[in-house]
Image (tube, rainbow, N blue to C red):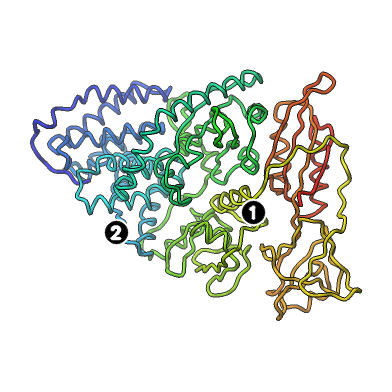
């Protein structure tokens, strides 16, 4: 933010810098055990060096300018940075806004601090002045050129941007809008990409205030009016969770209840057409911090035994870690805090919580030598920043291509027909694209064109492709989409829709396990077939999924015998429907390969199992399902005593594509320690 050299004013008395410095030093010492006298001296010297350089400068608000680097540094300390990052944050405007040169900074504080300061200066020059595709790519280019050499540049810049947003009232209205929009569209996604969720929420909430002032004021007032009610709910819920964990002898470190970010609430209300905050049922969530991973699953079992879990809302991100390294157990229960509304609970270890809160900044390891070194394991796991990017003589498009092939290996960028840039996880499909546009577009998706050519809905999109979605009124999401979609947004929308249309399961009867059998009960064809043609018998509630879509017209080929449990494919002839063939049908060899589409059969089952109690049981069960790529729609674990032994009856809703897949799952269960029996396997059709 520009500075103005002015004399002190009565409205802004002298700042107590010594007190601010002491507060800063205490904060560093609280998280950095190796904070040496030499480190303390370097930070102190940088503090007064910056104050002296900015001494006669003031911000637009009239405040002494150095209050800004100090405030930005205090924000940076929240993610536990190293000493060079702290010094760079204190001095990040010195080279640009004072007579001091980069060479002088290097002479005083070393080459690393100089590079970080220069990197922040380069990023600060980036402005998003319009919605044109080229400008967005240019912004991304400049941001990542800086990051390519040292990730800490972004840490400092994000802290700088958060404080600037918090003092945006003193900036002219037009510039406020531009800075807020730039922050929302560029800096918030960058913060999220680095796992800095708290930074992302603060950026979006502060930007929200200036981009949508009326909505911001209304929402803030609604939340203020109901604050006491929420505080009471959090207090009661925390007490209940503590009691439940103690009763089940599950050790815990901390239970935290907190509200969704302001902008997240606004987005949800807008997306769901809600008129009041009272209609947002997941306004409050809880985090239960457990000392070790195995006991996370014990805590989950204890919580599920006390409150009713919502079907389809259980997520095991410990066995199936997210691509960005995120780990946690998620469940949503009914009745917590004496409330009828659903409440999400996240269960994780302190390390998982640190990863989620601080992202890469959590992985600075302080050695006994009191020097800092970035956690190489984390860098390897999150490798998306190349050693160097040669920006010289490169067009934006050339840079973007290289960016996609290297640092964004787990992301792709595709375009709408209007040229808007859409960022998606690698291997995303047209379904992921559709849900990114809007949930209604996703729900109603019936087809897609990629670069003008029709593609199946499971087609893996590539960088730079133009995607056009075809929709049809009345269509609903296909559960089989969950098998191939990649984005969390699409998965969440589909599962939420399916949950609304699915009734709660009744407790399965206590019976000995029947042998699953594909008993013929239904023949589905689009045209009458001769009696001599082999029929594909499928149980009630199943469907043939063609190209990721259900309810497609088809008939059974007469040249082969497609059967339940066998691999099948669909061939698009010149007619109105598809012909279903066995995957090994010899006739397929004469067909154009572009007309042969993957097909499979989907069927939901309820599987009830019995186990003796032990630590890590649910983890091992979930690991089998993740390993077999079987979708778990819901899980209920109920404790029971049998012959004086504590046991658990665990009922799962699963989605399988074949009887063989179902039987493999049961065999894998039987090899898990403490398995007793499969009580029942029932089709949910």
Task: Give the alpha-carbon distance from disc 1 to disc 2, as whole Å.
Answer: 38 Å
Q: Which quadrant: the N terminus?
A: top left
Spot the residue most to the right.
Answer: 532
Label 2: which secondary element: loop
Residue 344 image point, x, y percent: 55, 36
Q: Are marks 1 and 2 in contact (CB under 8 Å)?
A: no
Specify the quadrant of the image occupied by residue 50: top left
**10 Å neighbourhood of mark 2: few (<14), some, or many (≥20)?**
few
Specify the quadrant of the image occupied by residue 58: top left
**Looking at the image, is mark 1 or mark 2 nearer the viewer?**
1
Closer to the camera in the image, 371 or 199: 199
Report whether 351 appears left or right of 93. Answer: right
Spot the residue most to the bottom.
Answer: 574
Classify 174 as above or below 93. below
**10 Å neighbourhood of mark 1: few (<14), some, or many (≥20)?**
some
Task: State the count of labels.
Answer: 2
Q: Which residue is mark 2?
A: 129
Closer to the camera in the image, 408 or 539: 539
Give the label on residue 482, or none.
Answer: 1
Using the rendered image of the protein, determine whether residue 614 is visible from the camera's viewpoint: yes
Report whether 17 appears left or right of 11. Answer: right
Label 1: which secondary element: helix
Residue 670 image point, x, y percent: 83, 37
Residue at (56, 67) in percent of width and height: 471
Closer to the camera in the image, 170 or 265: 265
Residue 256 image point, x, y percent: 49, 28
Classify 211 as above or below 576. above
């Amino acid at each position: 933010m520009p500075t103005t050299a002015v004399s002190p004013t009565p409205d802004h008395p002298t700042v107590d810098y010594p007190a601010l410095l002491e507060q800063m030093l205490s904060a560093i010492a609280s998280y950095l055990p190796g904070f040496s006298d030499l480190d303390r001296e370097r930070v102190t010297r940088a503090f007064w060096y910056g104050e002296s350089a900015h001494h006669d400068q003031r911000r637009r608000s009239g405040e002494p300018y150095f209050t800004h680097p100090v405030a930005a540094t205090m924000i940076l300390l929240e993610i536990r940075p190293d000493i060079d990052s702290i010094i760079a944050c204190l001095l990040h405007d010195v080279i640009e806004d004072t007579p001091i040169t980069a060479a002088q900074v290097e002479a005083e504080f070393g080459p690393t601090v100089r590079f970080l300061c220069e990197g922040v200066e380069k990023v600060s020059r980036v402005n998003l002045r319009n919605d044109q595709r080229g400008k967005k790519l240019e912004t991304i280019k400049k941001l990542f050129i800086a990051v390519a050499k040292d990730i800490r540049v972004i840490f400092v810049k994000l802290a700088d941007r958060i404080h600037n947003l918090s003092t945006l009232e003193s900036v002219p209205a037009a510039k406020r809008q531009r800075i807020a929009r730039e922050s929302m569209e560029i800096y918030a996604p960058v913060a999220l990409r680095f796992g800095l969720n708290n930074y992302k929420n603060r950026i979006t909430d502060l930007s929200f205030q200036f981009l949508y002032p009326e909505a911001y004021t209304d929402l803030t007032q609604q939340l203020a009016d109901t604050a006491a009610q929420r505080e009471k709910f959090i207090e009661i819920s925390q007490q209940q969770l503590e009691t439940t964990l103690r009763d089940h002898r599950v050790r815990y470190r901390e239970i935290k209840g907190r509200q969704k970010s302001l902008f997240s609430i606004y987005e949800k209300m807008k997306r769901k057409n809600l008129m009041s905050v009272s209609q947002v049922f997941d306004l409050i969530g809880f985090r239960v911090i457990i000392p070790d991973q195995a006991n996370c699953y014990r805590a989950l079992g204890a919580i599920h035994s006390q409150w009713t879990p919502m079907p389809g809302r259980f997520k095991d991100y410990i066995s199936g870690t997210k691509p960005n390294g995120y780990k946690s157990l998620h469940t949503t229960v009914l009745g917590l805090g004496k409330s009828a509304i659903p409440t999400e609970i996240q269960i994780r270890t302190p390390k998982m919580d640190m990863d989620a809160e601080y992202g890469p900044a959590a992985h600075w390891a302080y050695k006994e030598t009191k020097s800092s070194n970035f956690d190489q394991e984390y860098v390897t796991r999150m490798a998306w920043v190349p050693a160097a990017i040669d920006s010289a003589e490169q067009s934006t498009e050339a840079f973007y291509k290289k960016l996609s092939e290297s640092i964004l290996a787990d992301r792709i960028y595709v375009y709408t027909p209007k040229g808007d840039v859409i960022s998606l996880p690698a291997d995303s499909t047209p379904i992921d694209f559709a849900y990114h546009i809007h949930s209604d577009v996703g729900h109603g998706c019936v087809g897609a064109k990629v670069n003008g050519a029709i593609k199946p809905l499971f087609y893996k999109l590539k960088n730079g492709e133009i995607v056009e979605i075809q929709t049809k009124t009345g269509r609903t999401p296909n559960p089989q989409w969950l098998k191939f979609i990649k984005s969390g947004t699409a998965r969440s929308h589909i599962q939420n829709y399916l949950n609304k249309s699915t009734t709660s399961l009744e407790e399965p009867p206590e019976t000995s396990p029947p042998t699953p059998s594909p008993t013929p009960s239904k023949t589905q064809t689009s045209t009458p077939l001769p009696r001599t043609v082999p029929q594909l018998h499928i149980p009630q509630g199943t469907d043939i999924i063609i190209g990721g879509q259900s309810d497609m017209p088809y008939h059974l080929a007469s040249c082969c015998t497609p059967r339940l449990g066998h691999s099948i494919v669909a061939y698009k002839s010149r007619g109105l429907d598809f012909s279903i063939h066995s995957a090994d049908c010899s006739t397929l060899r004469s067909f154009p390969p572009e007309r042969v589409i993957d097909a499979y059969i989907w069927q939901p089952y309820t599987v009830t199992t019995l186990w003796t109690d032990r630590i890590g049981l649910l983890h091992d069960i979930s690991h089998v399902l993740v390993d077999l790529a079987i979708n778990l729609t819901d899980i209920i674990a109920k404790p029971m005593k049998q012959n004086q032994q504590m046991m658990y009856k665990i009922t799962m809703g699963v989605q399988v594509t074949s009887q063989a897949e179902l039987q493999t799952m049961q065999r894998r269960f039987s090899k898990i320690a403490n398995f007793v029996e499969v009580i029942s396997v029932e089709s949910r059709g």
